[in-house]
Image (spheres, rainbow, N blue to C red):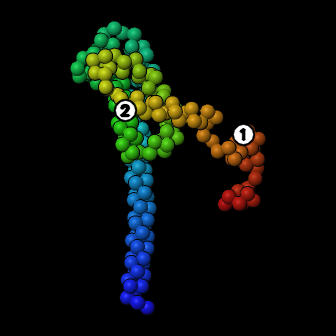
Amino acid sequence: MTVELLTAIASVGTLVVITAGSIAAFVQLRHLRKGNQLSGLLSVLELFQQPHFHELINFVRSELPERMKDDAFRASLKQLPVDRRIHPELHVADLYEEIGSYVRAGLIDEDMFLLGHWLNVLLYWSLLEPCMEIVRRHSPHTFENFEFLAARALIWRARHPQGNYPATLPRVSGDARAAIVRTPAREEGWA
């Protein structure tokens, strides 16, 4: 074997090792990114479980529509800054604004979040839109990330007009539930 041939073989070997290392690094980065996105999503989902957030949601769902009929309440949305003690509904908008920014930045996976929350995003956008409309008259770029999230939720809904339940998996209807209850899990291979 000539020196030139040995050098060529060594160069090809080096190229193979570098390529394999690059592929491994790419795979690790991808897994790391997914892990970080999951961590971000879990942090956000934890916020949804806080009792204070439930109080805010109850306010938005039950009290806000009536409060919006009050001229003074609506007028106070024009103040800068808006008093969040008078307008606790804006804390909900703030949370969705923050989530929208995380989704836009790729810190939370859009599909992972919208899989379980597209309906809530659209619901709270529609409930809060009258408030946000007033705020946006003097601050037009407020809640853009919430709007982005609502737009993405609309797209998600359009992509899944029949829902997101796997087409190949039978639904658990009344008859199927009864059969599951009557059939021991061991017979089905589930346990």
3D distance between C-alphas at marks 1 and 2: 39 Å
Provide residue 119's location: percent of width, then percent of height.
Answer: 52, 32
Q: Is residue 27 above or below residue 9?
A: above
Q: Mark 2 points at which residue?
A: 145
Q: Can residue 14 be seen in this view?
A: yes
Residue 47 in view, yes or no: no
Q: Is mark 2 on a helix, strand or loop?
A: helix
Q: Residue at image x 74%, y 44%?
A: 176
Quadrant housing the N terminus: bottom left
Kindly identify the residue that appears in the image at 71 percent across and 60 percent down. Answer: 189
- Point out residue 11 in the picture as x, y percentages from the top left corner: 39, 78
Viewer-proximal residue, 97 or 17?
A: 17
Above or below for 30 versus 5 = above
Q: Quadrant of the C terminus?
A: bottom right
Q: Residue at x 59, y 36 (%)?
A: 160
Q: Mark number for residue 173?
A: 1
User: Residue at the bottom extreme?
Assistant: 1
Q: Quadrant of the rendered structure where residue 138 is?
A: top left
Residue at image coords 40%, 10%: 69
Give the residue type at disc 1.
Ser
**Farthest left residue in view:** 80
Along the polypeptide, which appears first: circle 1 or circle 2?
Answer: 2
Direction from residue 176 to residue 154 in the image, left or right: left
Q: Which of 65 and 166 is in front in this view?
A: 166
The local secondary structure at tag 1 comes to loop
